[in-house]
Structure formats: C-alpha cells, structure tokens
Image (spheres, grey):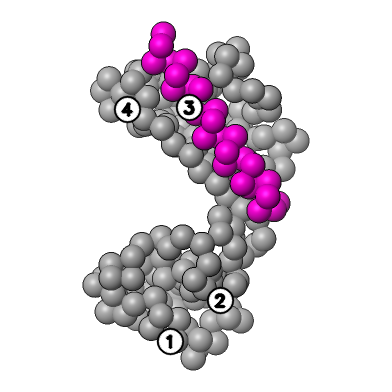
Amino acid sequence: MGGTKLTSDDAVRTATGRGFGEWGEVLDAWGARGQGHGEIVGRLVEDYQLGNWWAQTVTVEYERSRGLRPRNGGRDGLFTVSASRTIEASVDDVYKAVAEPAAREEWLDGDRLALRTSQRNKSARFDWGDGATRVNIGFVDKGTKTRIALVHERIVDEETADNFKAYWRDSLTKLKTKLESS
C-alpha cells in the first residue's frame, strides 16, 4: 500500500471486524474507485455502522492503496504536511514566539507568515506567502512544557510538500532550542 498506514491492520480488524485488505475488497465490489471521499465514508458509516473516525481511516487507506490519494495528499491533488515538538517553556512564551512577527524572525528563516486568526495560547492560523497555502498551529499547555503542532496545507505538489516538511521540522527545532536556552 502506498504511504504510511494511519493505523495497523490488526487495530482496524479489532475495531471494525475486517482488515484493510478485506475493506478494499468490499469497497471495490461497491465501486468505490468512482466515488468521492465523502460518499465512501458515508457508506461505511451508514451500511457498516463504522464510527466516523474508523470510516475515515479505512477510506484514506483504501484511497492510498488504490492510487487515488498520494502520501501526504488528498484526492483534490493538494498535499498537507505536519510537524510538532514539545518545548520546555510556558505556553505563553511559545505562543508569543509564533504569533508575534518580531519574535518569529528570531527562529523562522524566510518568515512568510501572515496572521489570519488566533486564540491566545491555543491556536494561530496563517496564510503562507501569497496565501495559496495555509499554516495552522496549535498549542497544548503541559504545565512547564508546551506541545506545538503545525499543519501546512494546500501544497500543490509532493516535492514542495517534502521541502516544507523538512523546513518546518528544522524551524520547530530552532524554536525549541531558542526557547529552552532562554
């Protein structure tokens, strides 16, 4: 199957009564290759009583296995990448380092983020560059540590997605180093 599975075959079998291969056979027999993502999920929920999470998981893996969805990509042809770090700093300090442009310049090379919306110490959403792609960042307060999780979406090709994945991993490592050495 193409790309990394979202969950193991044993886990999906335990939760749904079938493994990914068996679900593939069921969906092929139904004609899922010609259906949209939402239609496949809907069928799994309605006809097989799968919960939405499991229906999404089975559908994404089916789409990947049949070449309908590339790694890190959606059926719309766009790609999404993510990166995360746990940083030994307060959520307020991590949030400020991301949300405030002057603070961002200290760790983010080539900062092209334009703030769209934010919830202090919870999330920040940005346009990247000309706004064709988006960056969404979440913050989880873990007391003396903060978990930062970033998703960059609407990327047009796999090579660019791979480049962004490396960029964001490096950038979050720089942020972690900067804040933990302060």
Q: Residues within 10 Å of mark 3 (few under 14, many from 20)?
A: some
Residue 59 at x, y = what percent? Answer: 46, 71
Mark 3 / mark 2, whichever is N-terminal: 2
Q: Looking at the image, which is closer to me, 178 or 50?
A: 178
Residue that mark 1 sits on: 26
Q: Amino acid at mark 1?
A: Val
Magenta stretch bounds: 153-182
Q: Are marks 2 and 4 in contact (CB under 8 Å)?
A: no
State if disc 1 and disc 3 touch (CB < 8 Å).
no
Q: Is residue 124 visible?
A: no
Secondary structure, mark 4, is strand
Confirm or deny contact between disc 1 and disc 4 (CB under 8 A): no
Report, in whole angstroms, how far the alpha carbon at label 2 lies from the one at label 1: 13 Å
Q: Residue at x 55, y 34 (%)?
A: 168
Q: Residue at x 60, y 12 (%)?
A: 102
Closest to the camera, between mark 2 and mark 1, is: 2
How far apart are labels 3 and 2 at the CA level?
35 Å
Kindly identify which residue carries mark 3. 173
Circle 3 SS class: helix
Amino acid carrying mark 2 in the image: Arg
User: Where does label 2 land, which residue?
Assistant: 66
The CA distance from mark 1 to mark 4 is: 43 Å
Q: Looking at the rendering, which quadrant does residue 57 occupy?
A: bottom left
How packed mark 2 is, by other alpha carbons closer than 10 Å (few <14, some 14-19, many 20 or more), is some
Q: Residue at x 28, y 70 (%)?
A: 10
Q: Which residue is mark 4?
A: 141
Picture coordinates of residue 128, whole percent (x, y)? 67, 34
| Of pointers 2 and 4, the one earlier in the residue sequence | 2
